[in-house]
Structures are given as structure tokens and as C-alpha cells.
Image: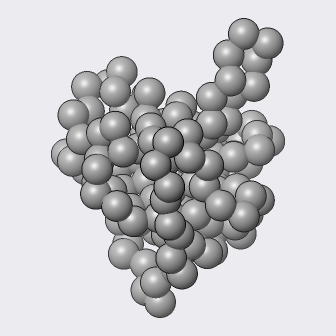
Amino acid sequence: MAEHVESAAPQDIDPEDAKIVTLARSARARTGAAEGAAVRDTDGRTYAACSVELPSLRLTALQAAVATAVASGAEGLEAAAVVTDADAVGADSVAAVRDLGAKAPVLRADARGDVVGVVDA
């Protein structure tokens, strides 16, 4: 998988990006999962999910959110956000976003919902 570089969080978060961070945070809190994520498609629709850890299926939160978007007919992504305690967004998560949004920023937020980094294209 290609390397991805995370830059520092911007001073001001776009309100639409703040919305997907809130959705990701809510998905994580609702289930008590390790991660919560949300994506926004090119039509402005949003999809939220949490990490899935079943005996027969394991998905990161971003993989699950991208899968939900695809299953709903999304053809592209504008942005993604993941709420996690990890120090970086995993390569598999970024790859799932890149499948639909080559230039979509991936925001990484902490449990409080504060954006701490961004993976750009």
C-alpha cells in the first residue's frame, strides 16, 4: 500500500467537515467501538459507521463507512473523518477512501472530536 502522510490539523475546520467528525464520534460512542468514521459523498450525503470485529469479518470504521456509501450508490467521496485513539489513520482505511475519492482529505480526530491531523491526497 502507498504511504500516506498526515499533516497538522487546520486552524479552522469547515462546517461540513465538522459535521462528519460529529457523526464519526457519535457512531463510536453509540457502540463503544474502537473507531467511528463518517464520509461525505460528492452529492453531500453522509454515511457513518464504526469498526466491526466479528469472528468472520473485520473492518475498520472507514472501510465500513465507505462500504455503506458504496451500497447506497455513492460514486465519489469529498471527505472522510475517523475518531480514534490511534496515532495515525491506518493504511487500509486510507486505501478504502482513496478507492472513491483520490483527493478526499481524511481527518483524524480524538475522542473529544478535536481534529488532530489530516491525510491529504
Q: Residue at x 44, y 27 (%)?
A: 67
> Residue 53 appears at what percent x and percent y?
75, 25
Q: Is residue 70 left or right of residue 63?
A: left
How many marks on residues? 0
* Residue 28: image location, x then y, percent: 69, 46
Residue located 72% across and 64% down the image: 87
- The residue positioned 43% from the left and 53% from the top of the image is 80
The C terminus - image quarter: bottom left
Q: In the image, residue 86 lies at what x, y percent? A: 74, 58
Q: Is residue 56 left or right of residue 93?
A: right
Whether residue 5 is situated above or below residue 69 in the rendered picture: below
Whether residue 48 is visible, yes or no, is no
Q: Position of residue 93 (x, y in %)?
A: 54, 43
Residue furthest top in the image: 56
Q: Classify 38 as above or below 60.
A: below
Instruction: For residue 90, say whether it is visible.
Output: yes
- Horizontal arrangement in the rendering, residue 60 relative to residue 66 (left or right): right
Quadrant housing residue 45: top left
Residue 55 placement: quadrant = top right
19 or 57: nearer the eye? Answer: 57
